[in-house]
C-alpha cells in the first residue's frame, strides 16, 4: 500500500474548510479499517479536526458512503434541534467539514479519498470496557441511535457493503478462501474449521427469522464495537461515531456486536485464551442501557432475536478474521503475520464461553426487558 508522509497528509488536510493554519497532524485512534489523524491548528483555543483516509479497498463507493454519512448526521442533528438541544449538536453528533470547494470528501492523486470531521473534545473511546456505568452508557447510545433513525426513509441509504452481516455470505466467502488457499495456510487451521462448521446451523437463526419475515429491517449501525461510541469524561453518552456501515439491518446484529466487545474481559486479539472470559456485570449493564432506550420499539420477535445475535456476532467475526487469514491478510490491518489467526481464536474462545453460560445470559436479558 502507498505510504503517506506527513507532508501528504497535511496537503490533504488543507483541502478542507478548517479555521486557522495547520500546526500538526498525528495518527489517532485504533480502528482496523480507515487511517485516522488528529489535525491541530495554530489558532489559539481553536478546534481540532479528525481527518480520515477512507479505505477505498473496502469502500468502493465512497461518494455513496459519504452521502449516507451526511444524511444520517443531518437527520440526527434535526432530531436534536427538535428536542431543544441545539447547543449540543456538535457534541452529540459528528459534524462533517466540507472541502474548500464544498464537497463531502477529497480525492488525492493516488485516488484515495479523505474526509474530515470536527474532533469532539473531552471524550473517550474504549477498546475494552472498564465499568458497568460505561457499558450502560454505550447501550443507551446505540439504543437511542436506532430509535432516532427509525423515521429516516431507509431507501435513501445506499447499501454500502451488501450482505455485511449475512452469515450465509460470510460462510461462502470462507469456503472460497479454503478452496483457493491463497496463502497456503488452510492445512494449519483444520481444527479451527471443524469448530466453525460444527456450529453453522445454529448460527443461521437470525437470518432464518429474517427470511421468514419475523424481523423488520431497520436502519442499524452495523459496527457497534465499543470504541465506536464516544463517552464524556464522566462516562455519560456523548456521540455514536464510525457511520460507514449504517445500512438496513436487524437489531440483533447491533446488539450482538456490541456485546462481543463488552462482555469479553480481554482484547479482541488476546493471545492468552485463558484471559478471554465473560464479564457478566458489563453484559447486564449494556443490556439494561440498550433496552431502556429500545424496548418500546422492539417487537417480541426482535427481543427473542437479541440473544441469538450475542452468539452470532463473535462467531461471524471469527469467520471473517479466518477468511482474511486464509486470503493472506487483504482486509484487516495486521501487526504481525498470525494476527488474524490469533483474532480468530480469541473470538472462538468467546463463543465457547458464551455457550457455556447460555442460560445465565438468557435470564439476565429477560430480566432486563422487564425493568
Ligand atoms: P475506523 O473505521 O478505522 O474504526 P473510526 O471512525 O472509528 O475509524 O475512528 C477511529 C477512532 O478515532 C475512534 O475509535 C475514536 O477513538 C476516534 N474518533 C473518531 N471520530 C472522532 C471524533 N469525531 N472525535 C473524537 N474522536 C474520534
Ligand atoms: C472493523 O472499522 P472498525 O475497526 O471499527 C470492521 C467491523 C469489525 C471490526 C472488528 C467495515 O471495524 O465490521 O467488526 O473491524 N469494519 C468493517 O474489530 O469491516
Ligand atoms: Mg471504528
Image (tube, rainbow, N blue to C red):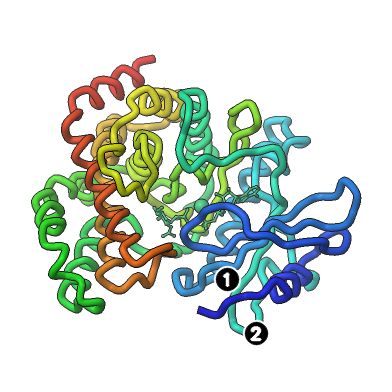
* CA–CA distance in space, label 2 to label 1: 17 Å
Where does residue 41 sit, x and y in percent of width and height? 83, 58
- Residue 49: image location, x then y, percent: 73, 55
Left or right of residue 65, residue 26 in this image: right
Q: Tell which of 82 and 237 is nearer to you.
A: 237
Q: Which mark is residue 75?
A: none
Q: Which residue is the site of mark 2? A: 109
Label drawn at residue 63: 1
- Could you classify mark 2 by the number of other residues whose Cα lies within 10 Å: few (under 14), some (14-19), or many (20 or more)? few
Q: Nearer the viewer, residue 336 or 368?
A: 336
Residue at image x 24%, y 39%?
308
Instruction: Name the front one of labels 2 and 1.
Output: 2
Q: Secondary structure beneath disc 1?
A: helix
Does any atom of ligand 1 lie closer than 8 Å to the CB of label 2?
A: no
The answer to whether residue 262 is above or below residue 131 is below
When asked about the image quadrant of residue 277, the answer is: top left
Q: Nearer the viewer, residue 110 or 155?
A: 110
Q: Seen from this angle, which residue lies furthest right?
A: 44
In percent of width and height, residue 200 lies at 13, 52
Mark 1 vs ligand 2: CB under 8 Å? no
Q: Position of residue 267 (x, y in %)?
A: 39, 44
- Up-down relation of residue 124 to residue 234 (above or below): below
> Which quadrant holds the C terminus?
top left
> Quarter of the image holding residue 326?
bottom left
What residue is drawn where x is 9% and y is 56%?
A: 194
Label 2 element class: loop
Q: As drawn, which residue projects farthest toward the top?
A: 371
- Mark 2 and mark 1 residues within 8 Å of each other at the beta carbon: no
Total numbered circles: 2
> Quick check: 329 above or below 37?
below
Amino acid at each position: 500500500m502507498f505510504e503517506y508522509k506527513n507532508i501528504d497528509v497535511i496537503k490533504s488536510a488543507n483541502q478542507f474548510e478548517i479555521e486557522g493554519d495547520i500546526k500538526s497532524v498525528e495518527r489517532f485512534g485504533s480502528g482496523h479499517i480507515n487511517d485516522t489523524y488528529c489535525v491541530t491548528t495554530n489558532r489559539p483555543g481553536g478546534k481540532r479536526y479528525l481527518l480520515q483516509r477512507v479505505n477505498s479497498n473496502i469502500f468502493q463507493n465512497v461518494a455513496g458512503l459519504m452521502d449516507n454519512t451526511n444524511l444520517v448526521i443531518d437527520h440526527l442533528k434535526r432530531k436534536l434541534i427538535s428536542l431543544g438541544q441545539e447547543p449540543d449538536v456538535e457534541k452529540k453528533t459528528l459534524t462533517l467539514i466540507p472541502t474548500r470547494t464544498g464537497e463531502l470528501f477529497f480525492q488525492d492523486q493516488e485516488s484515495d479519498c479523505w474526509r474530515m470531521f470536527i474532533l469532539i473534545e473531552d471524550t473517550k473511546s474504549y477498546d475494552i470496557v472498564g465499568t458497568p456505568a460505561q457499558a450502560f452508557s454505550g447501550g443507551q447510545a446505540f439504543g437511542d441511535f436506532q430509535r432516532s433513525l427509525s423515521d429516516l426513509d431507509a431507501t435513501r441509504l445506499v447499501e454500502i457493503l451488501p450482505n455485511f452481516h449475512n452469515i450465509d455470505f460470510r460462510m461462502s466467502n470462507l469456503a472460497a478462501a479454503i478452496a483457493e488457499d491463497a496463502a497456503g495456510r488452510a492445512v494449519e487451521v483444520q481444527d479451527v474449521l471443524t469448530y466453525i462448521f460444527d456450529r453453522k446451523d445454529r448460527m443461521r437463526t437470525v437470518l432464518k427469522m429474517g427470511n421468514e419475515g419475523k424481523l423488520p429491517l431497520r436502519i442499524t449501525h452495523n459496527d457497534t464495537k465499543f470504541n465506536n461510541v464516544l463517552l464524556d469524561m464522566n462516562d455519560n453518552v456523548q456521540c455514536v461515531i464510525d457511520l460507514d456501515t449504517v445500512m438496513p439491518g436487524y437489531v440483533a446484529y447491533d446488539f450482538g456486536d456490541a456485546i462481543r466487545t463488552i462482555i469479553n474481559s480481554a482484547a479482541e486479539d488476546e493471545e492468552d485464551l485463558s484471559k478471554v472470559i465473560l464479564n457478566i456485570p458489563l453484559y447486564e449493564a449494556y443490556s439494561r442501557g440498550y433496552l431502556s432506550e429500545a424496548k418500546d420499539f422492539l417487537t417480541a420477535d426482535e427481543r427473542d432475536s437479541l440473544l441469538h445475535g450475542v452468539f452470532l456476532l463473535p462467531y461471524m467475526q471469527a469467520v471473517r478474521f479466518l477468511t482474511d487469514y486464509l486470503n493472506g491478510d487483504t482486509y484487516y490491518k495486521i501487526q504481525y503475520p498470525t494476527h488474524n489467526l490469533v483474532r480468530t481464536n480469541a473470538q472462538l474462545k468467546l463463543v465457547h464461553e458464551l455457550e457455556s453460560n447460555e442460560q445465565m445470559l438468557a435470564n439476565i436479558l429477560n430480566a432486563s426487558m422487564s425493568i
